[in-house]
Image (tube, rainbow, N blue to C red):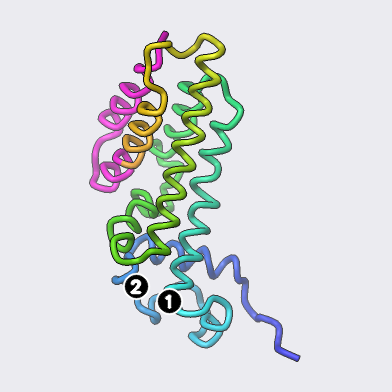
């Protein structure tokens, strides 16, 4: 009979996620991961597999903690403008001050997606999921008379995903809050009837 794990798997995964998010895949060594998680190499390998598997689990954890709440905020809403603004502004107002700046998914796309099909699939699925939820919310808004009939809603949804991810890149680069809010408000203004 195998021994029970003697560490908090969720806590270790959160620590690994933050380490990869801060340093990237290539910039994170196994020693960095054992130090951040407080878990020995062998225990990390037994729990998560190799560094690649741990990185993929960290991406999944990021999506669960930071991306799914955004999707949930937009699901079922009719006023997509208000819901999206309410979901995005906390990211710009420092609610994630203890987290690395920028978006881990964007960082993963830039660093790994070109060479790693599993990372690319996760990033693509996350962005496509957001685009779908935005499109559905805008369609509900249109049906309620809150969204102009002249807006190309699939195009708007794709542009909005691009804008949100671009905002996260600019945030990581130190852009000021007012610039980011202006970009968001411009995209949202496109929907006015």
Magenta extent? 166-193
Provide the secondary structure element on which disc 1 rests: helix
Q: Position of residue 16 (x, y in %)?
A: 46, 68
> Is 32 placed above or below 63 here?
below
Badge 1 crowding class, 10 Å Cα cut-off, few under 14, some 14 to 19, many 20 or more, is some
* Residue sitting at the far right: 1
**Mark found first going from the N terminus, 2 or 1:** 2
Count of labels in the image: 2
Viewed as shown, does residue 124 lie left or right of 146? left
The image shows residue 131 at horizontal and vertical percentages of 44, 36
Contact? badges 2 and 1 (CB < 8 Å): yes
Task: Tell me, yes or no, whether the highlighted magenta stretch contains residue 174.
Answer: yes
Q: Residue at x 48, y 71 (%)?
A: 54
- Whether the magenta-drawn stretch holds residue 187 is answered as yes
- Residue 27, by quadrant, is bottom left
Quarter holding the N terminus? bottom right
Alpha-carbon span between mark 2 and mark 1: 9 Å
Horizontal relation, residue 175 to residue 31: left or right: left
Instruction: Residue 46: give x, y in percent of width and height.
Output: 57, 83
Residue 69 in the image, given as x and y percentages of width and height: 55, 42
Q: Residue, x 50% and y 52% (percent of image)?
A: 63
Position of the C terminus, as image quadrant, is top left
Along the line of sight, the residue nearer the viewer: 170 or 188: 188
Q: Is residue 8 left or right of residue 92?
A: right
> Depth check: 37 or 84 in front?
84
The answer to which quarter of the image holds residue 167 is: top left
Return the residue at label 1.
51
Q: Depth check: 46 or 31 in front?
A: 46
């Amino acid at each position: 009979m195998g021994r029970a794990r003697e560490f908090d798997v969720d806590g270790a995964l959160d620590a690994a996620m933050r380490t990869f998010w801060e340093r990237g895949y290539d910039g994170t060594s196994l020693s960095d991961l054992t130090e951040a998680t407080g878990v020995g190499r062998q225990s990390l390998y037994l729990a998560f597999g190799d560094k690649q598997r741990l990185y993929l689990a960290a991406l999944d954890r990021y999506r669960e903690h930071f991306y799914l709440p955004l999707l949930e905020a937009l699901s079922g809403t009719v006023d997509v403008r208000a819901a999206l603004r309410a979901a995005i502004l906390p990211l710009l107002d420092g609610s994630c001050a203890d987290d690395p700046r920028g978006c881990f998914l964007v960082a993963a796309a830039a660093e790994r997606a070109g060479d790693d099909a599993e990372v690319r699939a996760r990033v693509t699925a996350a962005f496509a999921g957001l685009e779908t939820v935005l499109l559905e919310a805008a369609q509900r808004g249109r049906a309620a008379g809150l969204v102009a009939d002249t807006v190309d809603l699939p195009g708007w949804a794709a542009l909005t995903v691009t804008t949100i991810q671009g905002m996260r890149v600019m945030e990581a680069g130190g852009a000021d809050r007012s610039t980011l809010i202006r970009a968001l408000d411009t995209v949202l203004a496109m929907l006015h009837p």
